[in-house]
Image (tube, rainbow, N blue to C red):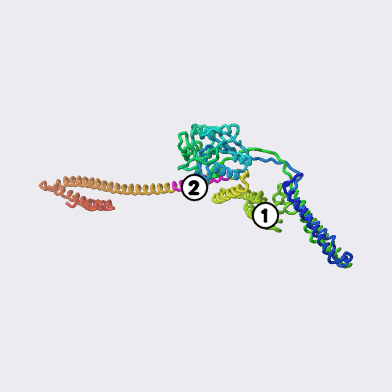
Amino acid sequence: MQWGEPKIFYMLWSVGLLGVFFWWAYRRRKQMWNQFAVSSLHAEIASSVDSQKMVWKNIFLLLVLFLSLIAAARPQWGFELEEVRREGVDILLAIDTSKSMLTEDVKPNRLERTKLAVRDLLKKLKGDRLGIIAFAGNAFMVCPLTVDYDGIVLSLEDLDTQTIPKGGTNVGAAIAQALDAYKEIPSEYKVLVLLTDGDNLEGDPLQWAKKAKDAGLKIYSVGIGTKEGELVRIQDESGKSQFLKDQNGNFVKSRLNERLLQEIALSTGGAYVRASGAQFGLDLIYDQHIAQLEKRQIDTKTRRRYFERFQIPLGLAVLFLILEPCIMTRRPRTGLKGKFLIVILSLFLFNFSTGQVFAASKPTQVQQGNSFYKAGDYNKALEKYRGALQEDPESDIINYDAGTGYYKSENYLEAIAHLEKSLLTEQLELKEKVHYNLGNSFYKLGQQVQKREPQTTISSWEKSLRHYEDALELTPNDHEAKENYEFVKKELEKFKKELEQKQKQQKQNSSQQRSEQKSEEQQGQDKQQEQGQSSAQDQKEKKEGSKAEDQKQDASEGQDQNQGDTRQEEESLDDFSAEKEPSSSDSLTGQMSQREAQKFLEQYQDNEQPQGLLNIMRRRGKESPVLKDW
């Protein structure tokens, strides 16, 4: 058996003090009775007062106070073994302890202001190991890496300008000391914070900064002081304050060398901050840079976790506190009827209390639902949870159990509805679990409608990420929530890229289809134009061909007619005298028929149907032969 708060035992004197007060009050009351009447009359005068019960009331009050103090001391017995993992970042602070740090351009001076900033940083650290390197002309590890923050404060208080015997300022020596300290530490992230005015007098700090970069050491520098600088005030052996002088007797003025500190930080991938009056800069470097680094497992221990038993003395104290007012200091004057009623009432209360105990001992619907849930029968578990919700629909615990059951049954909408109701709980541990399960439910819901409703999927996954973030705010060391957050984030980015590619492809396909339709329409129009041109050319060729055929046919008819005329002339020479010259008249008649044909051709060559007119002309020529008329 052990005690969680043994300091509470110092309060037990209050029980004795209260007991003394009750004893004094009892004696005082008795003296007053004796003054009021003789002792033989006390029983008759105060026959209704029971002095013994008054004593018991006082004893009950003393027990209430005593048991309350025992409960506050947290008695513990029985234990279980648990593994405790400590995670954090290793941080080395290199503090300049040269005489230039006594300059008072930063109040009270540069060194004291640095110590105050380190104390403020210790309040923020949770499991991170911290070490301190003091440097001036040389460097020395005054406090190795440790989580004993009280020991760090003691080492910090001992720092002064006499910590390093060798004077001057050698920033490179501080970097070299940090590299030696990190050699035996398997840390992926090595951090060194330089707290100095940058007034380097020895060595080549930039060369050491290159070596630090090769070794994976990031250097963050905090510049302390002002660019204008100020004279260095020191105390002599007699304790008098005076200004520091160099070997030639000139006063030494220390200024902030920002350029050197910036080059050191940037060359190793770190950052530089200049300390000001309101914001020193050390907290800023830790919050924005060092705290974002991945924490490594520093230590793992197995410890005994004792079970708290304060409920037992606390319950007894409450019981005595309830019983104390029930003790009546006056004697009851009850007859047979009164005693009978007391017995009946006692029996009724006994039956009622036993019924309550029996009902309490019966497993509740939530407990039955939990049993079915652990057995994997989620449908029966949901039946029990729904029955419990009918009795208490606003219960955070029951809504959480029901939401988890719906999640296992893949009914994610109902799971989200019940889990969101349980977010109103004030229990931080339960609220973290609710946010975690809501993140899972929104992811599964988005996965269900991923192909049908991509925008719903994006919205659900974004809500999932927000719930994982809320869970991590409540429990930053929840690795499962962190892994799920990273997984859903990658899936969401991947899905958005795929959706954008599909939309671009659809736009390209639609534009290609429109261009193909336009090209097909253009080709159709070109074909129609070509067909129209070819048909017009064919008609024209047909017209020209018909004209040529008519001319050939007329020419052949004219030749046949001339030949007929010649034959007729020869025949007429035999019948008539030889003095007549019919050949001249025949040639004139042939010329007239040719002129008539030419006239028709010239007059109707542009007509749509010249062939019909030529046929009429041919028929007319055949119907009236010229030779027969002669």
Quarter holding the N terminus is: top right
Instruction: Look at discs 1 and 2 and give the one toward the viewer.
Output: 1
Residue 355 seen in render: no
x then y, percent, for residue 545? 28, 46
Between 124 and 215, the residue placed more toward the observer is: 124
Q: Is residue 495 magenta?
A: yes
Outermost residue on the left side: it is 579
| Residue type highlighted by circle 1 | Asp
Q: Main secondary structure of the magenta part?
A: helix
Mark sitting earlier along the chain (1/2)? 1
Distance between the Cα atoms at labels 1 and 2? 44 Å
| Residue type highlighted by circle 2 | Gln
299 relative to 31 in the view: left or right: left
The numbered mark at residue 503 is 2
x then y, percent, for residue 456? 56, 51
The numbered mark at residue 396 is 1
Outermost residue on the front side: it is 238
Question: Mark 1: which secondary structure?
Answer: helix
Q: Which residues are magenta?
A: 486-512
Q: Going 68% across and 56% down the picture, which residue do you hit?
A: 395
Look at the picture and state if 33 lies above or below 525: below
